[in-house]
Image: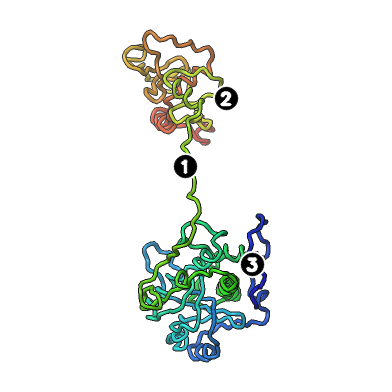
Amino acid sequence: MDPPSNPSLFEKTLPRPAPTLSYSWKEQCPGAQLLYIQDAELANKELSTLAPGAFGFDLEWKPTFVKGAGENPVALVQLANDETILLLQISAMKEFPAKLEELLGSSDFVKVGVAIQNDTQKLYRDYRVSTCNCVDLSLLARSIDNDRWKGKYNSSLGLARLIESYEYRLLDKGRISRSNWAGQLSKPQQLYAGNDAHAGYTVYRRLIAMVNSSSTPPKSVWYTFDSVRGRLCQPSGEQWRAYNPIYDPGPPPPPRVSKEPKAADDEASNNSSGPSQLPDNKLEGGLNKRPFRTRGRAGRFVSSQPQALNPSFREPKNAGNSGSSSRQFSASVAPSHYGPLLSSPSPQAGSSAAPITNSSQQRHSDHVGFRPQAARRWHRRHTPPTPNKSEKQQS
């Protein structure tokens, strides 16, 4: 697959709709072959035929779904170019292939991928294998195509996002990415793993073409690193970090504007100390500005005759004393034997509160402090059990 020679291909255009076609290595490189290898000797044989150059590089391992459990070792190593896609299942081999260790540690082979720093360090932790001449495609894209990508330089760009921008294709990242990569791989797993590695190779070819055609190409040390014994370093041996001195992150995001309280909220908070004079469809109770709801059960607990529920009921001593506290019990509609459950604020002395003119407003003022769960508990304790079907027939 030859990279495009027309620089106008990479110029920014007007926003376009999201792509509908999925990325496929078979479409990009019809002559390529995919090899799924589980034997170390066969892997060494195939790796020895590869010529130096760039390879899409990726790793997969079996996920863990137990909180606090450590990661499983690397199970699959993927390498892809325009001729061959190798899926090397290390977990099924008796030993790590010697040719693979040699290829990963050689600077003649460029290993490209998105945010592969962690992958190379994990590979060393699991198998004590170093990886040299690695290219982070996210850093390369920000370095050569800074006009398109803004934000922090070390903020990773997903491979699916890069494929959509430069190839106008969708890279499927579904539940299969969290499947068991240590077992026998199915055809969908092989297709996903091949596309993942080959997509990185395709993006690298696009971006490196921009580097070659640029009058001021970025320095390779801005996006290229070595991972030697788990340590990220430059070819000179100095410590490497993601840094580009001429990168333009763009303007910072605008600060968050705090929302001003609405006039309705202020009015509701000012009127929360007394009974509301709003119609039924606008009644709101409590300080949280929530509509009062009983879920259809208020009729069980509200009665004009409390003695009907409890014959041994006696009025509280302070039921008629409006000046003893700021809240009193109402006995006109709601049963006063609920005590504080159905309490409502009483007007202060000398206040000019408007009289309640209808029953709905009276119910609202009585139910400002209503708690359905506590009322149900009281109802179960003070109401005799309902006779069952057999008892009704006998009576």
Q: Residues within 10 Å of mark 3 (few under 14, many from 20)?
A: some
Name the residue nearer the viewer: 120 or 33. 120
Q: Residue at x 39, y 26 (%)?
A: 341
Asked if residue 394 lies left or right of residue 105, the reply is: right
- In the displayed structure, 66 sits above or below 328; it is below
User: Dots 1 and 2: beta carbons under 8 Å?
Assistant: no
Observer-nearest of 91 and 81: 81
**Figure check: 329 above or below 172:** above
Q: Is residue 155 left or right of residue 171?
A: left
Q: Amino acid at mark 1?
A: Arg
CA distance separating discs 2 and 3: 55 Å
Q: Position of residue 269 (x, y in %)?
A: 44, 24
Report the residue at 64% width, 72% height from top.
24
The three-letter code of the residue at mark 2 reads Asn
Disc 1: which residue: 256
Q: How many marks?
A: 3
Q: CA distance from mark 3 to mark 1?
A: 35 Å
Q: Position of residue 100 (x, y in %)?
A: 47, 85
Above or below, comparing residue 76 to residue 345 in the picture: below
Instruction: Please tell me which of labels 1 and 2 falls first in the chain.
Output: 1
- Of the two numbered discs 2 and 3 on the same chain, state the one appearing first in sequence: 3
Mark 3 secondary-structure assignment:
loop
Q: Residue at x 48, y 35 (%)?
A: 259
Q: SS of the residue at dot 1? A: loop
Q: Which residue position is annotated with label 2?
A: 281
Local crowd size for mark 2, using a 10 Å CA cut-off: few (<14), some (14–19), many (≥20): few
Do the numbered discs 2 and 3 sit on residues whose CB atoms are within 8 Å?
Answer: no
Q: Which amino acid type is marked by label 3?
A: Glu
Dot 3 corresponds to which residue? 167
Q: Judge depth for marks 2 and 3 and give the one in front.
A: 3
Mark yes or no: residue 142 visible.
yes
Check contact, mark 3 vs mark 1: CB within 8 A.
no
